[in-house]
Image (tube, rainbow, N blue to C red):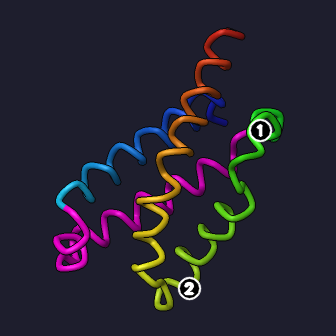
Amino acid sequence: MKSQHAYVAHVLECIARIESDSASGRDAVFGSHTLRDAIVRNLQVLCESVRRIDSAHKDLHRSIDWRAIAGMRNVLVHDYFDVDFAAIWDVITRDLGPLKLVMRAILARIDADG
């Protein structure tokens, strides 16, 4: 079993990759199967790692819709033919920044608790 530190660090790594893959902008991403596939894969991994973070950490950050993240993982993994990339783009532009801040706060708390 991985540590809580590893799961949170993995989420932050996925966010960094998504930010890098989407940095060229909406038109470039929508025009590239490779970028879209990379983003979707990193979102899948991010969602799976988030599911493994203890509720004690999540309970301190109720501004994040943890259930929606779990639900997104299920859609990305099981209903991948129905994935709406416009909705994914909204997640990238609206939700990743706040999630990154919370993940950094959780990681700092884990590190402080040692």
Magenta region: which residues?
Answer: 25-54
The quarter of the image holding the C terminus is: top right
Q: Say what amino acid the circle numbered 2 marks.
A: Asp
**Reading the chain from its start, which is encountered first: label 1 or label 2?**
1
Mark 1 lies on a secondary structure that is loop
Which quadrant holds residue 1? top right
Q: Does 72 sit above or below residue 98?
A: below
At a point 59% along the width and 18% down the height, the residue shown is: 108
Q: Does 92 sit above or below residue 29?
A: above
Q: Residues within 10 Å of mark 2 (few under 14, many from 20)?
A: few
Q: Does 84 sit above or below residue 92?
A: below
At a point 65% along the width and 9% down the height, the residue shown is: 112
Q: Position of residue 34 (x, y in %)?
A: 21, 71
Residue tagged 2: 79
Q: Position of residue 84 (x, y in %)?
A: 46, 84
Q: Nearer the viewer, residue 105 or 78?
A: 105
Q: Nearer the viewer, residue 80 or 64?
A: 64
Q: Position of residue 68 (x, y in %)?
A: 69, 65
At a point 53% along the width and 74% down the height, the residue shown is: 76
